[in-house]
Amino acid sequence: MLKFIRTLITFWSRRISPRLETLIGAIGIAGLAICLLLIWALAKLSGEVLERESFAFDTSFLLWLHQFANPILDNVMITITLLGNPIVVIPVAIVTLGILGWSRQRSPALMFAIACLGGTILNTGLKLVFTKPRPQLWHRLIVETSYSYPSGHALGSMVLYGMIAYLLAQRYPKLARIIYLVAAGLILTICFSRLYLGVHWPTDIMAGLGIGLLWLVTCITMLKLQNLREKSNEN
C-alpha cells in the first residue's frame, strides 16, 4: 500500500502537476473556477431540458418582451440577427482567417479555424441531441427550421466575435477594454434579437452563451499554451 501511494505521488508530481500548473498559469485560478461552475450550471440545465422540463419564466419573459414589439423594432432586430446568420458569419470567418494567414500568424489562424469548426459541430450536434422545439407564441417574422436548444446564434457569436476580440486585444492591448466591450455588446444584442423575434427561449440563449464561452476559453487556453511552448523552444 505504501509503495502504491509513493508511486501515485511520483506520477502526480512528474506528470500531472506540471501540466496543471501550466493550465492554471494560462487560464488563472478564477477563470478555472468560473469554468467549473459554468459546467455544473449547464449540466443541470441540460439535464432538465433532456427530461422535457418546462421553465415558466421562458414563456412569461417572451410574452412580456413581445408587448414592446413595433414595426421599427421589428426591422432593427431582423437586421441585427443577420449578424449571427451564416450569410454574415461565414464571410467574416473567412476574411479573418485570410488576414491571419496573410500575416503569417499560423498558430492563431489554426486555433481560429478550430474554434469556428468546433463551434459549428457543437451547435449542430447538441441541437440533434436535445431536439427542443422552438417557441410558437405568436406569428414569427422569420422562419427557423432547426431545433431550439442551444441557441446557435448565441453560441456561434460568442465563439466568432469573442475569438476576434481576443486576437485584436492581443495586437492592440491599449484598446483591449474597448474591444471587449464592443464584442460583448454585439454578442448580447444578437442574443436579444433572437428573443425579441420569438425564435428562442431564454434558456436556449443562456445555454448557447455558456457553451460558447466554455469552448472559447478552451481555444484561447490552447493558443496560450501553444505560445508558451513556442517561446520555451526558442529559449
Image (cartoon, rainbow, N blue to C red):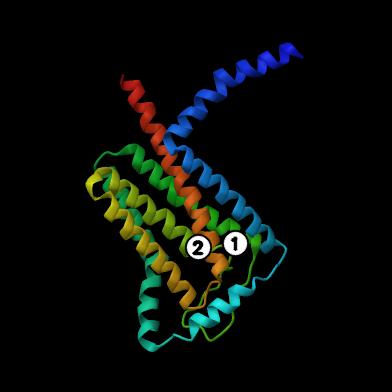
Direction from residue 167 to residue 3 in the image, left or right: right
CB contact under 8 Å: marks 1 and 2:
yes
Direction from residue 192 to residue 58 in the image, left or right: right
Which residue type does callout 2 highlight?
Gly
Query: Residue furthest toward the top?
Result: 3
Q: Identify the residue at image location x=61%, y=18%.
A: 11
First in sequence: mark 1 or mark 2? 1
Q: Considering only vertical position in the picture, is 17 above or below 49?
A: above
Q: Identify the residue at image location x=43%, y=51%.
A: 116
Which residue type does callout 1 highlight?
Lys
Image quadrant occupied by the N terminus: top right
Q: Which residue is mark 2?
A: 152
Q: Identify the residue at image location x=47%, y=72%.
A: 194
Image quadrant occupied by the C terminus: top left
Q: Identify the residue at image location x=32%, y=58%.
A: 181
Q: Which residue is mark 1?
A: 127
Residue 22, given in percent of the width and then of the height, sits at 46, 29
Of 110 and 77, the residue lying toward us? 77
Of 198 and 32, the residue lying toward us? 32
Q: Secondary structure at mark 1?
A: helix
Residue 219 found in image quarter: top left
Residue 155 appears anywhere in the view: yes
Residue 102 found in image quarter: top left
- Numbered marks: total: 2
